[in-house]
Image (cartoon, helix red, strand yellow):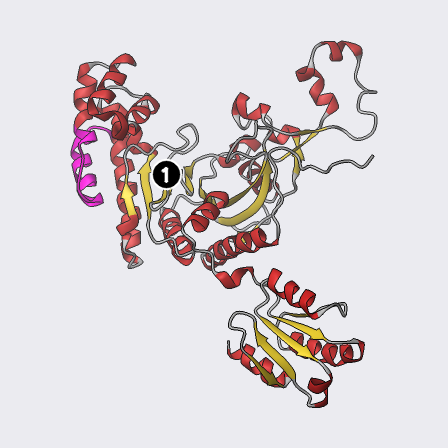
Amino acid sequence: MSMKPSSVKGTRDFGPEKMYKRQYIFNTIKKVFEKFGYQPLETPAMENLSVLTGKYGDEGDQLIFKILNSGDFLSNLPQEKYEEGSKKALSLLSEKALRYDLTVPFARFVVMNRNEIALPFKRYQIQPVWRADRPQKGRYREFYQCDADVVGTNSLLCEAEIVLMIDEVLKNLKINQFTIKLNNRKILSGIAEAIGETGNEAIICVAIDKLDKIGEEGVIKELLEKNFTQTNIDKLLPILALTGSSIDKINQLKTILSNSEIGISGISEIEQVFDYLNSFGFDAKNVELDFSLARGLSYYTGCIFEVKANEVQMGSISGGGRYDNLTGMFGMPGLSGVGFSFGVDRIYDVLEELNLFPLSNSISTQILLIAFDDEHEKYCIQALAKLREAGISAELYPERAKLKKQMSYADDKKIPFVALAGSDEVLNNVFTFKNMTSGEQQKLTIEEIINIQQQG
């Protein structure tokens, strides 16, 4: 009995059409990364389990896909370990795991190669990661991450260049309506300090973030329930009411946070980023200061970013921030860095929804050659060699099937041109060259066909 094939739940095949579209996104991103001096890096799908464990919190650790040791993995397992349960037995059964993200492998790479790499080290990495999550719409067990990080410098020039890169990538993908939200972790700490709730940034951010949905009164009610005093809240309200341009907001915030050293430090970092953008001659109209933005509170220590596409209902399509101690987990403290990632699957959905994929992108073969019978095959093969030599993607239909079948093949593969050769054509050293879109056809030599293709 033959088995019905199926793919693993939470994983996907990407057929040719999807692959062309994904490659278009990846290539657009890579070009910009490399233009800004970022270098490509790949790390293995597998890491030692000890490298990954303890880096993602308890919940994350449970989502790591473990790989069973090779051979008879149960033979070394003493009975008492087996009885102690899976957690105790795990280290004896599994020493390796699939990577959960690209950040921890990057940190491992930096520490292992610290004497060979030039600091600051700029790298980008586009590879799949795996999470043993419950699959649902938009959540997969295998998905691509697309990260760029620079480590080994505190300079805010890096933050400004991240804004430039995000802007350029999205504009090159023809996504023109987007917002790059910017905040600083130190500002959030300053706000908490200024209202008398030091260390409670997370609670404040969760409440502020709901301002649009539940209004000011709803936010006040929620904070009171979380044991905030009316005095705390009265100090917070002017911050919620900040309006105007980014510069206006910064100036108002300076007054409010004047007694918070960490808050003022965060404001001056944001100002420095805007100064750099200004020096680049960059129009920051798509950049918005958002003091409720609170990505990765336990992780980021400086500037934080989040990017939204404005014409579609969707979560963020890019995000990131500054962190202080990426390599500390591997015994190399004090290395500051800043990084961000693009959500490739979400960007794909945005381009699909807004119909922004270029049509030509899904075409691999430009010209299909068709020989009417075996004696004309050699004539077509010589022409095929010339086309490919000229850098034109072409193929010869490999069998002498009925003409209708061969033309259907061209249609199915969306091949824009067909060149047919029968006795007449061979005698006159030409092809019948047909435009599959307009239906127009003419008799041309292979040199004329090449010339037309190269002129575009």
Does residue 120 lie above or below 324 as drawn? Answer: below
Does residue 232 lie above or below 164 as drawn? Answer: above
Residue 40 on the magenta span: no
Going 42% across and 43% down the picture, which residue do you hit?
Answer: 318
Is the residue marked by circle 1 packed among few (<14), some (14-19), or many (20+) residues within 10 Å?
Answer: many
Does residue 385 lie above or below 144 as drawn? Answer: below
Quadrant housing residue 269 = top left
Residue 56 at what x, y percent from top left?
53, 27
Residue 72 at what x, y percent from top left?
83, 25
Residue 281 at what x, y percent from top left?
28, 59
Question: Horizontally, is 265 left or right of 2 in the view?
Answer: left
* Residue identifier under label 1: 304
Going 64% across and 28% down the picture, which residue do you hit?
Answer: 50
Specify the amino acid type for callout 1: Ile
Give, as a single range, the part of the protein colored magenta: 238-260
The residue nearer to you, when weighing 200 against 412, is 412
